[in-house]
Image (spheres, helix red, strand yellow):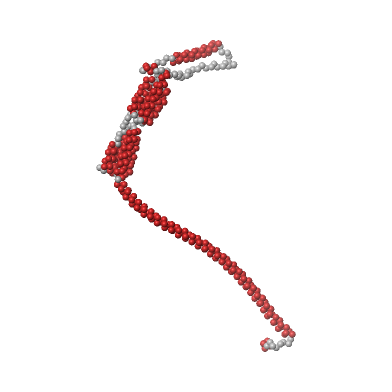
Amino acid sequence: MNDDLNPAVPDASPAAVAEPATASALPARGAARLWWLALTVLAAISVASLALAWKSDQRGASLEQELVRRQQDGAAKIAEARMLAKQAQEQTSESAAKVALLEVRVAEVAVQRGQLEDLIQSLSRSRDENVLTDIDAAIRVALQQTAITGSAEPLVATLKQSDERLARYKQPRLEGVRRAIARDLDRVKATSVADISSLSIKLDEAIRMVDELPLVSVAETRKDAASRDAKVAPAPAPSRFASAAPAASTTAVWSGKVGDAWGAVTERIWNEARSLVRVTRIEHPDAMLLAPEQSFFVRENLKLRLLNARLALLSRQFDTAQGDLQVAQAGLDRYFDRGSRRTVLASELIRQVVGQARQVGVPRPDDTLAALTTATAGR
């Protein structure tokens, strides 16, 4: 125990000397290993620190770039916002100017509205009088048109329009005027006025037929009523297989042919001889004395009479038209064949025109005019 505690006492034996040397070498090796381990750990820590520092530097650089980009974007947005703010300010100024102008216009419109209301009120007080005056003037103009044209259509149309116009106002004091218009409208519609257009068409048709009418003094060419039904049939060709016909049958065939030919010649001669003589009843003998070259002038004279009657109808001169139509009817009965169907048709057309070409006066709407005068006077 004491020996172990006292190192100064050396051991005299060689084994004792070798054991302390080995024991001192072991701690030295352990210390070297610790030193190298510490250096390795320190190197690893340094590398890790360097790596962390590099990453931190890269991250800082990226953050710096992001900050720069965002700063640039912010600057662009700020510039855009300033431009928009400037535009908004300009628009606000323009809007303020427009609002001021609109306020001025609204004030002007308010003044004009007040003036218009005053004008409408002044017009509404005399509206009924103006309507009655317009209706009276329209009816008088329609009377003039009716007198010029001879047709009742202008007066009928004016009365209808006046009734519809009064119906829109629904004024009790105008009901009397509407009743008067209804009475006059019924009387005017009941009037039968000559249709000038249809009469003119009938006269044109009669004028067209004048050139086709047969004259009494000129014999009209007569045609056969119908062609003969019986015709001579050709004799059938004898068959080579049949026996020869006897002589008696051949003679009968030839005699039949000769009889048919003789009958045809006789009938033709009789028709020609009958056409040479014509029996006609003539009430005016002087019509037969009309020369053939004068028939042209007779037809032209009849055309002129009908044309004069047509012009007189268009001019509403019914008395002149009646005189020309009567002369034309007399000439038609005197010089033309009344047994012809075309003459009968032309004469019937002229008679229809004579019967319808009458002067019919359109009644005046006196009740309506009187009612308008009374309503205008306020009684």
Q: Residue at x 29, y 47 (%)?
A: 125
Quarter of the image with the N terminus in it? bottom right
- Number of numbered callouts drawn: 0
Q: Residue 76: x, y in percent?
A: 52, 61
Q: Residue 176: x, y in percent?
A: 28, 41
Q: Residue at x 33, y 43 (%)?
A: 168
Query: From what the image shows, is residue 160 above or below residue 69?
Result: above
Single out the residue that lies furthest toward the right: 14
Closer to us: 275 or 243: 275
Query: From what the image shows, is residue 369 above or below residue 33?
Result: above
Q: Residue at x 50, y 62 (%)?
A: 78
| Residue 189 picture quarter | top left
Single out the residue that lies furthest toward the left: 379
Query: From what the image shows, is residue 185 above or below residue 223?
Result: below
| Residue 209 picture quarter | top left
In the image: residue 366, left or right of residue 297: left
State whether residue 27 appears in this view.
yes
Closer to us: 112 or 352: 112
Q: Residue 297: x, y in percent?
A: 40, 21
Quarter of the image with the C terminus in it? top left
In the image: residue 50, left or right of residue 133: right
Q: Residue 271: x, y in percent?
A: 45, 15
State whether residue 159 appears in this view.
no
